[in-house]
Image (cartoon, rainbow, N blue to C red):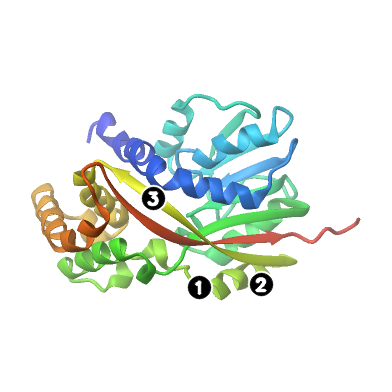
Amino acid sequence: MSPTQAKNPAETYESYFVPAMFLPWSKILLRHADLQSRHRVLDVACGTGIVARQAAPLVGALGQVVGLDMNPAMLGVARSRPAPAGASVQWQEGNAMALPFPEGSFDVVLCQHGLQFFPNRDHAVREMLRVLTPGGQAVVIVLQTLAQHPVFEALMESVARNLSLPVSAVMTPFILSDADELRNLFSVAGFQEVVVHAESATVRFVDPERFVPMAVTSSAAAVPAFAQLDEPARAALLETVRAEVEPVITAYRDAEAVTFPMFAHVAVAKRANVGH
């Protein structure tokens, strides 16, 4: 694979998925975060950096924003975007299971649609708590149930069926959908106060012919059975899935875009304000 090809998934994420889905969700996440001037902010699993770039003007030039991701290609795209106003953003490669920062480094930790992908969510949440200053807060957004998202449900059921897998093997984006489970993750980790809010957003994927192959490739990228397919087999799978989900997607598409509602939970979890 050439270097240009190797960068394509991260560039595709930024150009296709960020404006369609992650920009609307990031605005909701930041509304709950209520960032203030001078805040020190960590964006965990920042991807190509949409949350960090929007946080920078909110905390101002005297604030601090760090975007952390373990994928260097994502960080490469993040660094290539125009710098936002306000705080300069530091892009850092690192693992959410072992955040490379001292205790009490940040006032706010943010995580947009990343927590459900972490191999040890309990440990990741404890790490968020560790790097927060007393009185600081973590604000995390994750998707609600797959059943509330008929477009993705049709896509994932079709992919699973054609790969002879259970749906559970391909539905990772939706596996942390239970509000009580989400709340307990933070409570057990030691956060003092945890509130989970239900939210919705309308997502709009332009160029509807691209939607199915892009969504399937993105969702199934971490599924070994999909990753191991050669190019002809992958193309055949995408065409089969496209045909199978067309009746569902028709209800949400026009000539310009596929548009539908999505649903998420936002957890706002505060570290105890000890010593004050």
Label 3 sits on a secondary structure element that is strand
Residue 70 visible (yes or no): no
Residue 107 visible (yes or no): yes
Q: Which residue is mark 3?
A: 203
Label annotation for residue 178: 1
Classify the position of the N terminus by image quarter.
Answer: top left
Camera-side residue of 259 and 2:
259
Mark 3 and 2 residues: CB-CB less than 8 Å, in contact? no
Q: Is residue 170 left or right of residue 65?
A: left
Q: Given the image, on which type of amino acid does mark 1 rest?
A: Asp
Q: Could you classify mark 1 by the number of other residues whose Cα lies within 10 Å: few (under 14), some (14-19), or many (20 or more)?
A: some
CA separation in Å, label 3 and label 2: 33 Å
Instruction: Give the foreground label among 1 and 3.
Output: 3
Q: Is residue 73 above or below residue 276?
A: above
- Residue 256 position, x and y percent, is 25, 41
* First of labels 1, 3 by sequence position: 1
Q: Which residue is mark 2?
A: 188
Residue at image x 33%, y 40%? 16
Residue at image x 36%, y 71%? 147
- Residue 65 position, x and y percent, is 63, 37
* First of labels 3, 2 by sequence position: 2
- Residue 14 position, x and y percent, is 38, 37
Q: Given the image, on which type of amino acid does mark 2 rest?
A: Val
Residue at image x 65%, y 28%? 86
Mark 1 and 3 residues: CB-CB less than 8 Å, in contact? no
Residue at image x 63%, y 32%? 57
Label 2 sits on a secondary structure element that is helix
